[in-house]
Image: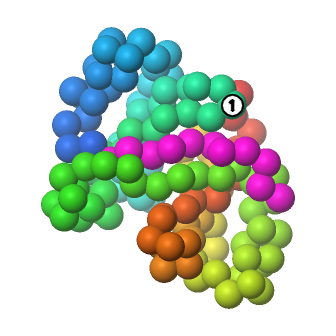
Amino acid sequence: MITALDHIAIAVPDFEKAIKRFMEDFGLPFEGTEDVIAAKTSTAFFPLPPTQIELVHPLNGEGPIAGYLEKKGGGLHHLCFRSDNIEEDIARLKEKGYQFLGDAPTAGAHGSKVIFIHPKSCDGVLIEINQPGDEHH
């Protein structure tokens, strides 16, 4: 079941500059960065309970975020919903005709399991479903 809006992700061309903007200019609490090797992404999190802002930037200049930035130069990248049973949610949504990017969940930040719904299934919005790992506070 979907239980919360886990995060809103923003693709940023200049990682350090964007981190400073949210930390210093907007005064948001900064939780640190994490490289998600599977997604070729560097992430930075700013908790705003019960949700958070996630900045996403290409890891080593490659991966899907790099392609997005080339096309769009930055912007809102995806919405992420938190799930308490990701496999159940995937099965239910597949039955309703939703298409996913990938067949099964992959490893996300903070030890979570994640999967993305194809934007075509959601009026052009990329939606991630995330089941937090044990290390999530």
Query: What x and y, as percent, mark residue 92?
Result: 80, 77
18 horizontally vs 114: left or right: left
Query: What x and y, as percent, mark residue 122?
Result: 55, 72
The residue that appears at 25% across and 35% down in the rendered structure is 15
The residue that appears at 58% across and 82% down in the rendered structure is 99
Residue that mark 1 sits on: 50
In which quadrant of the rendered view does residue 116 lie?
bottom right
The residue that appears at 63% across and 74% down in the rendered structure is 104
Q: Residues within 10 Å of mark 1 (few under 14, many from 20)?
A: few
Query: What x and y, as percent, mark residue 44?
Result: 41, 33
Residue 108 showing in the rendered view: yes
Q: How is the image coloured?
A: rainbow
1 horizontally vs 41: left or right: right
Q: Number of numbered discs present?
A: 1
- Vertically, is 7 above or below 117? above
**Screen quadrant of the C terminus:** top right
Q: Outermost residue, front direction?
A: 123
In which quadrant of the rendered view does residue 62 lie?
bottom left
84 horizontally vs 67: left or right: right
Query: Magenta: predominant secondary structure element?
Result: strand
Q: Amino acid at mark 1?
A: Pro
137 horizontally vs 124: left or right: right
Q: Which residues are magenta?
A: 1-11
Is 70 in front, or is 131?
A: 70
Is 67 in front, or is 76?
A: 76
